[in-house]
Amino acid sequence: MGPEMNDRTCIVTRESGPADDMIRFVAGPDGSVVPDLKRNLPGRGCWVRAERRLVDEAVRRKLFPRALKESVTAPDDLGALVDRLLVKSALGSLSLARKAGVVATGSAKVDAAIRSGRAVMVLHTLEAAADGVRKIDQARRAFVYAGGPDIPALSLFTGDEMDLAFGGGNVIHAAVLEGMAANGFVKRARLLHHFRGGSATNSDRYAVDAAKETETE
């Protein structure tokens, strides 16, 4: 992928970091700046820490041409484009997790997954009713009170987006269960959450680590 793999330095903050916490960008054939989420596109790349505000700042300060050493143009909505790509990647991974049987849907099943300790992450649609969220939060708090770890609950997707991942069904609440098949989605959900300004809390870190415990690769 080139020398920059050994220099993952954010072009905005000038701080280095692991690739999983950054977004790689390359110059497209048409002279545009292209997000490279899979980090496998050819050519010189540059890195921005995975935060929407930093991508927007890189565009505003016109940092991409200097970083890529090419006369490239970054669209004003580059941050929004990255968000859409992260959502698409996460939803694809969520669909695979569902097919692998490591996702429970519906309030009752989500509640049971939390109380049994099988859930590593809870999802609510952006339109979820406050009362439904509150009831599931009660189960999360009860699990912590009983000595279990905090289970993160994220609201990342609209109802339509969740339905896309689940093939319909009007899914409002879901629990991602422990298992190797969940690891990919948990990683992508965490990245999207962070990109949108969510903090890397201990509960986020637990969710990632819990999923990785069963990873064999």
Image (cartoon, rainbow, N blue to C red):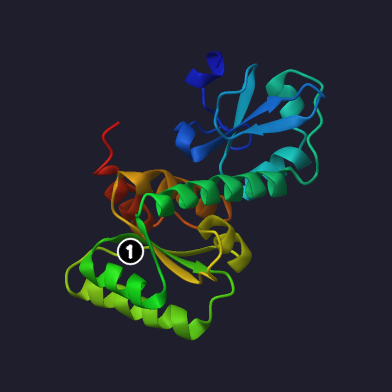
Tell how many labels: 1
Q: Quadrant of the C terminus?
A: top left
Residue at 28%, 50% (x, y): give it.
Answer: 210
Which amino acid type is marked by label 1? Ile
In the image, residue 10 sits, relative to residue 31, either above or below, namely below
**Residue 166: percent from left, percent from top:** 51, 59
Residue 55 visible in the current orientation: yes
Q: Quadrant of residue 18?
A: top left
Q: Quadrant of residue 81?
A: top right
Residue at 55%, 31% (x, y): give it.
Answer: 38
Residue farthest toward the left in the current orientation of the protein = 147
Residue at 51%, 55% (x, y): give it.
Answer: 193
| 2 lies left or right of 117 | right
In the image, residue 42 sits, relative to residue 175, either above or below, namely above
Residue at 76%, 25% (x, y): give it.
Answer: 65
Instruction: Judge by depth and name the residue closer to the eye, 37 or 10.
Output: 37
Label 1: few (<14), some or many (≥20) within 10 Å? many
